[in-house]
Image (cartoon, rainbow, N blue to C red):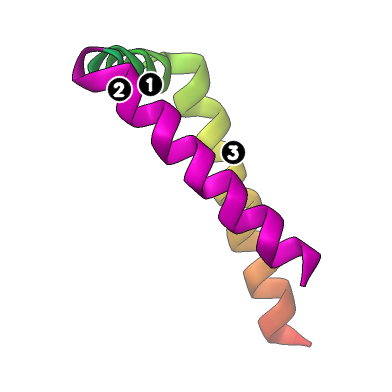
Amino acid sequence: MAFKTGLILGLGVGYVLGAKAGRDRYEQIVEGFHDLTGRPEVQDLVAKGKGLMDQANRAARST
C-alpha cells in the first residue's frame, strides 16, 4: 500500500513540476535525448543490449 501511495504522490509531484517547467523546457529535454541517442557509441551500446536480450530470449525458450 505504501508503494502505491508513494508512486501516486511521485507522479503528482512530477506532473506539477513538469507543468511549471513549460513547453520550452520540454523541448530542451527532448532535444537533449535525441542528441544523446543519436551518438554512435550510444547506438552501439543499444545494439549490444538488444543482442544480449535476444540471446537470453533464445536461451529461455530452449529450456
| Residue 13 on the magenta segment | yes
> Left or right: where does residue 60 sit relative to residue 18?
right
Which class describes the residues within 10 Å of circle 3: few (<14), some (14-19), or many (20+)? few
* Residue labelled with disc 3: 48
* Residue labelled with disc 2: 30
- Label for residue 33? 1
Which of label 3 and label 1 is nearer to you?
1
Q: Position of residue 14 (x, y in %)?
A: 49, 37
Task: Name which of mark 3 and mark 2 comes first in the sequence.
Answer: 2
**Kind of residue indicated by mark 3:** Lys
Q: CA distance from mark 3 to mark 2?
A: 24 Å
Tag 2 near tag 1, CB within 8 Å: yes
| Residue 61 on the magenta segment | no
Tell me the magenta residue range: 1-24
Q: Quadrant of residue 32?
A: top left
**Count of numbered badges drawn on the protein:** 3
